[in-house]
Amino acid sequence: MRARPGIASTRLRRLHDGFLIVGFWLLLLPREAHAYLDAGSGSLIIQAVVAGAATAMLYFRRYWAKVKAVPRRRAPGNDAEGDDD
Amino acid sequence: MTTSVSGSFRDPSGHLFLHEGRIHRRVNPVYRCHYEAMMASGFYEAVVGDGSLIRHEEVEPAAIPGHEDAYRILRPEVIPFVSYPYEWSFSQLKDAALLTLSLQRRALEFDLSLKDASAYNVQFREGRPVFIDTLSFERYPEGRPWVAYRQFCMHFLAPLALISYRHPGLGKLLRASLEGIPLDLASRVLPLRTRLRPGLLTHIHLHARSQRVHGKSAASADVARTSRVSRIGLQGIVESLEMAVRKIGWEPVGTEWGDYYEDTNYSSEAEAHKQELVSGWIDQLCPTTVWDLGANTGRFGRIASQRGIFTVAWDADPAAVEKCYRDARAAGDGAMLPLIVDLMNPTPPLGWAGSERMSLSERGPAHVALALALVHHLAIGNNVPLDRIAEYLGSLCRFLIVEFVPKTDSQVARLLRTREDVFPDYTVTGFEAAFASRFTVRDRLPIRDSERLLFCLERR
């Protein structure tokens, strides 16, 4: 007759199963791209912090560039350029 | 027969080696998916086409002993001369920075990203910076921050800001710290007003603070590992860096040699005759390479570069080298490469095992060297005996065009004005005797309307 597994061994089996499941999902997840340099925690975190502001500035500059381009397109002699749009 | 290149060992994607005298790049199987993505996406053709990235051809790995197991072997185009960021002037470093950012911006458009942003990945070819590390591009996983962001700020942004806001001599810090200038150091040295510049505030000051706060904490490392930046956010960061770099400026004024040619003591006739003699000898020698030592703004080196002869113009003064680079760039003179080197303390071998980056002499010898109005600065300004000057110059070149400026010349008199004359051998006879041990005289001519002499020498 086999001995009943104790609480400790049950926990170990659960832990083992848990590792297997996590490992399975890690295999399914896209692998982290190869990064042979240490990017640095502080350098990664600051990017996440400033990305929002950088995005806003990017949109603003693109929008502003379009606004500035309008009078040029409407200027006499630039009709052909405007017709292409 | 293959030999590994000592400066190429960090990246597991591959490394450089020499085979039959040509540089080759081994690509390891681990880089395969990235290489295929780069070549298939059209990115490689786009950036090679406009001269931003060096072109390569593929070589059959089986044909190269010891590399049969490589995924690919690449043979890149030849760079005429390897130079290092600590030898570049302000605008050279700035142009290299803008090239790196432009490549990262365009890489993102092709679902690629730079995995490193080292200034050592840039060289100068035909007067323009070119990116030489083909294996620096990898597939871009959506949402990942730029892993090379810190390296870019340390290699480019920090030294540019220090030169611009503090002193041009601070570019030399790159020689002391090959990994780039630590951001906490830059943040402490830069003046308070740089905190009013959004780019410098973000990428240097706040960046340094973030490193200080999060650098050693395990919890921060967990946060950093899972931090995400959207693609548009990343594009915003790259554009913000580009704006920060573009806004950093520096004008080459107020240093020792910046206005040297405006402060010369010889007549325009002497100047014209000196140009004529140097031109004549260069035409006779038909050199493959010329090093203009103590070149100032490169006026005489340009005699060679304008003939299409590859010329490196060395000078210790950052302002003179900056002027030389700007002039050559404006004139489209692609044969001229100005670099900052002090002959009293020339670039030593540096880096891992003292062999990662080459010394000045390892990159020679030049076919012809010019040493015009130089010897008196070494001999009298710095107390170097004439025979030692001859010995060192002889190790740098095959032919030497050298000028002797006598003590009666006002430039030498100025050097002796505030010191005792302890140079009894500094005479034409002493000069000729010292150089005779190392060189034979091909020609010896006086410069008209001056007391100076020009020699054309050949190494024994």
Image (cartoon, helix red, strand yellow):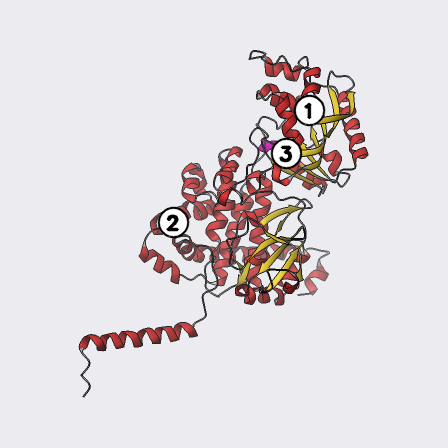
Q: Residue at x 38, y 49 (%)?
A: B211
Q: Are marks 3 and 1 on the same chain?
A: yes
Rendered location of residue B144, percent (x, y): 46, 62
| Above or below: residue B109 compared with residue B267 | below
Give the mark toward the camera: 3 or 1: 1
Q: Are marks 2 and 3 on the same chain?
A: yes
| Above or below: residue A60 compared with residue B321 | below
Judging from the image, what secondary structure is the residue with disc 3 in? strand
Number of residue marks: 3
Look at mark 3 in the image and give the residue it sits on.
B314
Magenta residues span B313-323
Look at mark 1 in the image and give the residue it sits on.
B437
1 or 2: tag closer to the N-terminus: 2
Which amino acid type is shown beneath numbered disc 2?
Gln
2 or 3: tag closer to the N-terminus: 2
| Above or below: residue B111 compared with residue B7 | below
Mark 1 Cα shell of 10 Å, populated few (<14), some (14-19), many (≥20) = some
Q: Tell me the tag on residue B211.
A: 2
* Horizontal side, residue B231 vs residue B270: left or right: left
Rendered location of residue B327, percent (x, y): 68, 37
Quadrant where the N terminus of chain A lies?
A: bottom left
